[in-house]
Image: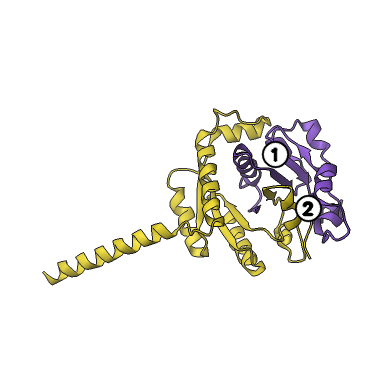
């Protein structure tokens, strides 16, 4: 199942996302949290220390918008880019496409 | 063709949750991070601006064919539930839940500390209720159905009684 959390800035998307992830993880489900912000706020909400949060590798754009054809497998993607968190949720940093382009 | 963050990732994760920080471009049809989302939770706070954003996002989500789109009220104080209910009714999306305003959440945000298990209990309960709502929706149940049926029965009863009174 894939859930998107949307809304205007400041409404509490990141806190809500982290709490939702914790509920699913608490039921023993394998949870992947995908952050799209260049600031590692979701990482912090999932319990990573600020230094660790800064180190989360950014998914290459080709993997975010790519088709997956001939690219790496999902397992390899998580191995290369997934970061475990104290919430027992795996975090991926898919920094927003527009921000990545502007950076 | 499927995005790697779309269906393929489900081999490795039971739940993939995407926190969409920025604008609506992520709802892109061409395989952005929200392509193939099963559920979209539209987070709102009791402010006019957040409601306007919600309206635009819901319209776009419909256009993209995301099957389940729900509203979530956040930072709610007493009386705000009715506000969120009426906004969702206006946009034609069910309200999946309302999360109360909580100083523990504000404080943990400010300090950068993760909330302990004894903190934010009302907030956690509200989030659990939202998860239960999404479970039902994914199972193909219509979470609003029971309430709608109850309201229709009530309306029937009220109409009947009003007719009786005017006949007297």
Residue furthest right as drawn: A70
Give the label on residue B71, or none.
Answer: none
Quadrant in which the C terminus of chain B is drawn = bottom left
Q: Which residue is mark 2?
A: A96
Q: Chain of mark 2?
A: A
* SS class, disc 1: loop
Colour chosen for chain B: yellow
Q: Which residue is mark 1?
A: A89
- Image location (x, y in percent) of residue B92: 51, 64
- Specify whether residue B47 is in view: no
* SS class, disc 2: loop
Q: Residue at x 53, y 56 (%)?
A: B137
Q: Nearer the viewer, mark 2 or mark 1?
A: 1
Apparent side of residue B156 relative to residue A40 in the rendered image (left or right): left
- Image location (x, y in percent) of residue B118: 54, 27
- Mark pair 2, 1: CA separation: 20 Å
Q: Residue at x 83, y 60 (%)?
A: A66
Using the image as rendered, state which of residue B40 and residue B52 is in the foreground. B40
Badge 1 crowding class, 10 Å Cα cut-off, few under 14, some 14 to 19, many 20 or more, is many
- Image location (x, y in percent) of residue B90: 49, 64
Q: Is residue A27 above or below residue A95?
A: above
Q: Residue at x 50, y 39 (%)?
A: B125
């Amino acid at each position: 199942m894939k859930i998107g959390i949307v809304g205007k800035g400041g409404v509490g998307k990141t806190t809500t996302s982290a709490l939702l992830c914790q509920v699913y993880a608490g039921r023993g489900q394998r949870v992947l949290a995908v952050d799209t912000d260049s600031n590692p706020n979701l990482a912090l909400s999932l319990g990573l220390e600020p230094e660790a949060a800064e180190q989360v590798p950014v998914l290459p754009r080709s993997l975010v918008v790519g088709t997956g054809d001939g690219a790496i497998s999902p397992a390899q993607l998580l191995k290369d880019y997934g970061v475990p968190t104290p919430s027992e949720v795996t975090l991926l940093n898919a920094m927003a496409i527009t921000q990545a382009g502007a950076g | 063709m499927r995005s790697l963050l779309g269906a393929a990732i489900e081999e490795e994760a039971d739940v993939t949750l995407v926190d969409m920080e920025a604008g609506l471009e992520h709802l892109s049809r061409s395989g952005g991070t929200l392509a193939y989302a099963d559920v979209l939770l539209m987070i709102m706070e009791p402010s006019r601006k957040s409601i306007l954003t919600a309206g635009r996002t819901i319209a776009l989500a419909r256009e993209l064919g995301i099957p389940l789109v729900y509203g979530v009220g956040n930072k709610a104080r007493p009386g705000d539930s009715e506000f969120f209910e009426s906004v969702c009714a206006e946009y034609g999306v069910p309200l999946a839940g309302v999360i109360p305003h909580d100083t523990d959440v504000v404080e943990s945000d400010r300090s950068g500390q993760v909330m302990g298990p004894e903190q934010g209990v009302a907030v956690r309960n509200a989030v659990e209720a939202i998860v239960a709502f999404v479970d039902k929706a994914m199972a193909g149940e219509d979470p609003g159905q029971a309430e709608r049926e109850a309201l229709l029965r009530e309306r029937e009863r009220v109409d009947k009684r009003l007719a009786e009174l005017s006949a007297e």
